[in-house]
Image (tube, grey):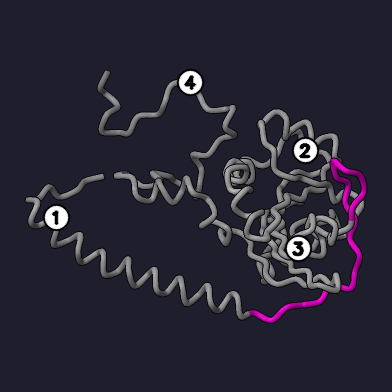
Amino acid sequence: MSHAVVSREEWLEARRALLLKEKAHTRARDALNAERLALPWVKLDKTYAFDTDSGRQTLDQLFDGRGQLLVYHFMLGPDWDAGCEGCSFMADHFDGTLPHLNHHDVTLVAVSRAPLAKIQAYKRRMGWKFPWVSARDSDFNRDFHVSFTPEELAGETIRYNFTDLPSAQGHDELPGLSAFYRDAEGQVFHTYSTYARGPEEALGTLMLLDRAPLGRNEGETMNFIRRHDEYEDVQPKSACCAGAD
């Protein structure tokens, strides 16, 4: 990647011009967040149950006494040997935020269709502490369009990210993030879901890389990501430093 090298005065002029765009982006993001909060809600009348470390629990029990619930749809199918690399990258960001979310009346839980024992084993391998439950015997993942049957994949399209996608490009599990609210009467409402690159802003590592000199330095989206225990010991070097000791 080639960049112009300029005087400090020229750099400041270019940086101030970019700052105006960054501020406009921040204001646009604030406006989008306001629209997100203004979305109508859907009352859930269906009962969902999950296998958890504390036994069988319903969706309203996953709130753990709080009024708000964020569910990360983690790609780990019943017959998978390990969790999705991208979902594992996302999950690496969860533990540090739990105290802050919990003290803001928000519970964060990951949900997968893998049996609980497989979830627990992978969780131990990765050293995570956040709540992670199994929807193995539940319609939850299918109802929120992140898990697909062989029959659905054999069809022409699947429904994901609020649109129909060619099933040939689909997987039996896909990622997403869903939000729920529980009122004083115990009624649960679905308030929001986002899929594909929608949860990307929760990936603090990517937000930091976006401000590094070479950015994400990726080919395809996040193709540089590995599970955190699968990186090579030698740290990668940028192309400009490849010949340096």
Q: Amino acid at mark 2?
A: Trp
Q: Residue at 83%, 47% (x, y): give it.
A: 134
Q: Which mark is residue 80?
A: 2
Mark found first going from the N terminus, 1 or 2: 1
| 25 relative position to 61: left or right | left
- Tags 3 and 1 in contact by the CB under 8 Å rule? no
Look at mark 4 in the image and give the residue it sits on. 233
Give the CA separation, mark 3 to mark 2: 19 Å
Q: Secondary structure at mark 3?
A: loop
Instruction: Report the residue marked by disc 1.
Output: 11
The quadrant the C terminus occupies is: top left
Q: Say which amino acid is labelled 3.
A: His
Q: Which mark is residue 145?
A: 3
Q: CA distance from mark 1 to mark 2?
A: 50 Å
Magenta run includes residue 225: no
Residue at horizontal 72 percent and vertical 35 percent from the top: 123
Part of the protein shown in magenta: 39-57
SS for dot 2: loop
Residue type pointed to by label 1: Trp
How many angstroms separate mark 1 from mark 4 (CA)?
A: 36 Å
Q: Name which of mark 2 and mark 4 comes first in the sequence.
A: 2
Q: Please name the residue shown 59% across and 52% down the image.
A: 100
**Contact, mark 3 vs mark 2 (Cβ under 8 Å):** no
Callout 3 touching callout 4 (CB < 8 Å): no
Please give left or right for residue 162 compared with residue 233 in the image.
Answer: right
Give the spatial CA distance, label 3 vs label 4. Answer: 38 Å
The disc, 1 or 4, on the residue closer to the chain's N-terminal end is: 1
